[in-house]
Amino acid sequence: MKAIKIFLLTIVLLIVASVIFLYSSLNDVVKKGIETVGSDVLGVPVSVSKVEISLKEGSAQISGLQIGNPTGFKTDNAFSLGKIRLAIDTSYLTTDTIKINDLTIVDPKINYELAAGKNNIGVIKKNIEAKKSPSDKKSTGEKRSSNKASKSFIVENISFSGGNVTTLIGSLEKNVNLPEINIQNIGNKNNPASAKQVANVIMAEITRNIIQNTDLGEIRDQIQGRRKEIKNKVKEGIGGALKGIMNKP
């Protein structure tokens, strides 16, 4: 009898230890997942500083999310997202769908860079569009089980606050504060969205707000003014050199 009690106590302690390990490692598992899936979907490096999850409250906070720039652009990151807060519907945790009641992004910093006739945000958006979702894969070697392994999403509300965009064209740089951005109702119970579809909606809305709030005409005038200034300096330099030659005895 005593041996049975010791055995049962050992089992209970093992279960408790397993739960403690699960909770302590969950943050690292999610952090790694964001970095891996994010890099795959966006086609650029994605890194996260810290993830804090409370399953009991159905909440999470992600700090220091950095989304890198595509090759060919000079700044390191396209996005630097200060803090991301999520409210998750815990009733969906055992399903293939993740329901996010609210996703708040605080102090996002965006570098909108134009180079060689294209912009970095547009390149990332094309990366997302070019990425095949599991339902797009038709090869005979892939089974429907791959669909079950991928999570789908229902997102009720996304908000961006305190956003700032830096537009870079060559050596010119302009900073603009963005108004609050709100996005509602991506996916639903009958037709949840894929990670690709969620990313596409967010990128499209961010791009629209950047273009709407950035005076590209003013930047264009600055570029033209800079070109005239350089042209005049070149003329002055050539004129001075010729004058010096002509005045030589």
Image (cartoon, helix red, strand yellow):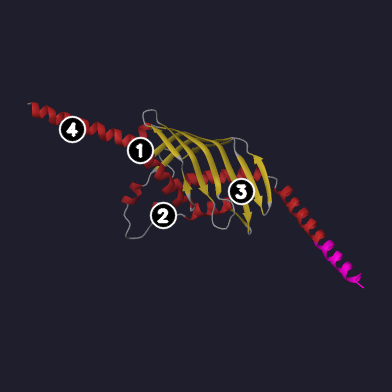
Task: Name which of mark 3 and mark 4 comes first in the sequence.
Answer: 4
Q: Nearer the viewer, mark 3 or mark 2?
A: 3
Q: Which residue is mark 3?
A: 112
Q: Which residue is mark 1?
A: 26
Task: Name which of mark 2 and mark 4 comes first in the sequence.
Answer: 4
Assign the magenta stretch its main secondary structure.
helix
Q: Determine crowd level at label 1: few under 14, some 14-19, many 20+ residues with C-alpha closer than 10 A.
A: some
Towards the viewer: 107 or 213: 107
How far separated are the C-alphas under marks 3 and 1?
34 Å
* Quarter occupied by residue 141: bottom left
Q: Determine crowd level at label 4: few under 14, some 14-19, many 20+ residues with C-alpha closer than 10 A.
A: few
Report the residue at 33% width, 34% height from top: 23
Task: Name which of mark 1 and mark 4 comes first in the sequence.
Answer: 4
- For residue 136, say whether it is visible: yes
Contact between marks 3 and 4 (CB within 8 A): the answer is no
How far separated are the C-alphas under marks 3 and 2?
30 Å
Report the residue at 44% width, 38% height from top: 50
Q: Which residue is mark 4?
A: 11
Q: Which residue is mark 2?
A: 136
Tell me: 231 left or right of 18: right
Tell me which segment is drawn in magenta.
234-249
